[in-house]
């Protein structure tokens, strides 16, 4: 029996098909073209081998912001040092630079050896500065921390109490010079026990107008000189001495300029803190993170600080000592979710371009901006971004520019442990896949020989890498990071389409690339992050 449709039914069917086609087309991701230019002539920045750094803080469980208490047992005083995931997460970096400090560091008392007095915990008191009483670091806990850091391969910078010996004036400023006696006792104990500390940092957020209170630049410089002299005295005879860092505060051009000038050669590293997204309670955090112009504004403190260092003629170098993006513990499912990787990696790339040597993420664990989940210790997406950067991005920074869309952020470095260069592409666009061509100035490529002698290589000069037939046989490594189910608020990240999950033994998953033909375009999906290792490229900046 034949099929029969009435005219109204046919019209309805055609309408449905037409609507469905429009719906499918509206949901279809567009593909656009773009190109990145990498200048291989010379590096524009030079970062530390262990550029990636993370912080551990002092906040007790009672630390709450906007009605949410996000710190749990992540304090230096109560963190579970027996947790396998925590140990493996640090060990995977070999080493991970860890900065110990934060707001309460300027209220920490160090227990002296043989001291029989009770060592008090931080107790909440809203009438006191920072909302807590003084707290105490016992030497038994200091022992535990140092043993853990040694075994896990952490490289430790410790933030000292810079308010010791001072009083707070009626105008809120700290009065008097720093009393270094407690710090001296701690440092001597550390040395006598054979513990290795890479650096001693003086104070937290007391620069400029300060947080809670402030110290003048002149006084801070004098105190920094005192710390430097103390370190030189205690470590006399040591081949390698810890570096001295300060002030661990927010950038204030006049204050920082005066501080650098008056600290003379006593200050090896000047550290600034970055929370340029505003408070964690801000409902527009995601909009800011995905706004290229807003991200561009983040370069200003890096640029200004480098200008100060250049003009001073000082050997002091710049670090970001603490960066959580959004202050007051961040925001759940934003600063600990996939979307935050766009801000974080952009900051890493931008800081590197301005010769910032180290970048410390707030936090390794704790608050709503940890690389690890505060409760389960399971890595959040940015942990894997940090680990890929650490393994792939070398010390020499290359100049890049992107054409085609302002939604792609691009950065390039000489590769870290092998030849070639590594390119980082960040797609802030949720609707367009961008096919990216790569143009490399002053480059040479090493091409596998097709002749009988496998040891022979051909060297080809080129300035353009884009569908070049002669090098189709060569491969590049790609690492594509995307959010699970495309949800920017997801705390699970996919690497090349596969979930990254720790196993039952707490082992961090291996980060394996996919390989693509060297001459093909790089496919950057919507809301994705891509690391591309081009190991056959040779440029003057990397030799």
Image (cartoon, helix red, strand yellow):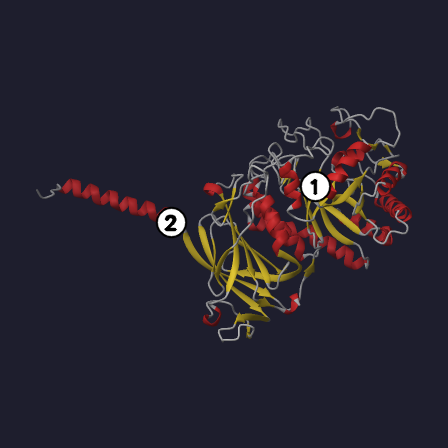
Q: Position of residue 245 (x, y in %)?
A: 80, 47
Q: Is residue 250 left or right of residue 440?
A: right
Near-viewer residue (170 or 493): 493
Near-viewer residue (434 or 47): 47
What residue sits right under mark 2 in the picture? 28
Rendered residue at 56%/73% (across/down)? 455
Rendered residue at 54%/41% (across/down)? 501
Q: Is residue 90 left or right of residue 161?
A: left
Near-viewer residue (325 or 534): 534
Spatial CA distance of label 1 from label 2 is 42 Å
Question: Residue 55 got which mark?
Answer: 1
Picture quadrant of residue 411: bottom right
Image quadrant occupied by the N terminus: top left
Count up the numbered dots. Answer: 2
Rendered residue at 63%/42% (across/down)? 89
Q: Is residue 9 among the parts visible in the rendering?
A: yes
Q: Is residue 78 shown above or below 54?
A: above
Picture quadrant of residue 123: top right
């Amino acid at each position: 029996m034949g099929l029969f449709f009435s005219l109204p039914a046919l019209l309805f069917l055609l309408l449905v098909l037409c609507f469905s086609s429009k719906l499918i087309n509206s949901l279809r991701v567009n593909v656009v073209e773009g190109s990145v230019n990498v200048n291989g002539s010379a590096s524009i920045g030079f970062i530390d081998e262990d550029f990636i750094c993370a912080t551990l803080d002092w906040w007790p469980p009672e630390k709450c912001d906007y009605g949410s208490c996000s710190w749990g047992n992540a304090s230096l005083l109560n963190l579970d040092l027996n947790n396998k995931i925590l140990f493996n997460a640090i060990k995977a970096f070999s080493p991970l630079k860890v900065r110990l400090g934060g707001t309460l560091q300027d209220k920490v008392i160090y227990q002296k050896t043989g001291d029989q007095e009770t060592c008090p915990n931080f107790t909440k008191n809203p009438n006191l500065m920072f909302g807590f009483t003084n707290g105490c670091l016992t030497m038994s806990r200091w022992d535990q921390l140092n043993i853990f850091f040694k075994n896990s391969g952490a490289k430790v910078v410790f933030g000292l109490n810079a308010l010791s010996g001072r009083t707070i004036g009626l105008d809120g400023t700290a009065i008097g010079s720093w009393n270094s006696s407690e710090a001296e006792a701690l440092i001597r104990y550390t040395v006598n026990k054979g513990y290795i500390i890479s650096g001693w940092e003086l104070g937290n957020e007391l620069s400029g107008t300060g947080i809670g209170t402030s110290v003048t630049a002149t006084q801070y410089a004098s105190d920094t000189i005192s710390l430097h002299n103390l370190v030189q005295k205690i470590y006399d005879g040591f081949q390698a001495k810890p570096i001295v860092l300060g002030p661990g505060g927010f950038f204030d051009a006049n204050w920082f300029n005066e501080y650098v000038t008056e600290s003379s050669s006593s200050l090896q590293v000047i550290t600034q803190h970055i929370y340029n997204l505003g408070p964690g309670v801000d409902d527009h955090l995601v909009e800011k993170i995905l706004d290229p112009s807003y991200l561009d504004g983040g370069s200003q403190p890096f640029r200004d600080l480098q200008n100060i260092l250049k003009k001073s003629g000082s050997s002091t170098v710049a670090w970001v000592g603490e960066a959580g993006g959004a202050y007051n513990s961040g925001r759940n499912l934003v600063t600990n979710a996939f979307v935050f990787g766009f801000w974080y990696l952009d900051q890493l790339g931008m800081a590197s371009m301005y010769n910032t040597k180290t970048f410390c993420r707030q936090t390794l664990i704790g608050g709503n901006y940890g690389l690890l989940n505060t409760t389960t210790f399971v890595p959040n997406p940015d942990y894997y971004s940090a680990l890929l950067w650490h393994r792939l991005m070398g010390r020499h920074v290359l100049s890049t520019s992107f054409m085609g869309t302002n939604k792609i952020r691009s950065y390039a470095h000489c590769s870290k442990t092998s030849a070639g260069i590594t390119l980082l592409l960040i797609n802030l666009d949720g609707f367009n896949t961008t096919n990216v061509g790569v143009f490399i100035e002053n480059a040479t490529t090493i091409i596998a020989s097709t002749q009988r002698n496998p040891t022979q290589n051909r060297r080809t000069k080129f300035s353009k890498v884009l569908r070049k037939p002669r090098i189709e046989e060569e491969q590049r490594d790609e690492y594509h990071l995307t959010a699970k189910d495309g949800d920017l608020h997801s705390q699970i990240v996919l690497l090349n389409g596969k979930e990254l999950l720790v196993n039952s033994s707490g082992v961090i998953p291996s980060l394996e690339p996919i390989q693509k033909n060297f001459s093909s375009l790089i496919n950057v999906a919507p809301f994705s992050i891509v690391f591309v290792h081009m190991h056959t490229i040779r440029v003057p900046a990397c030799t």
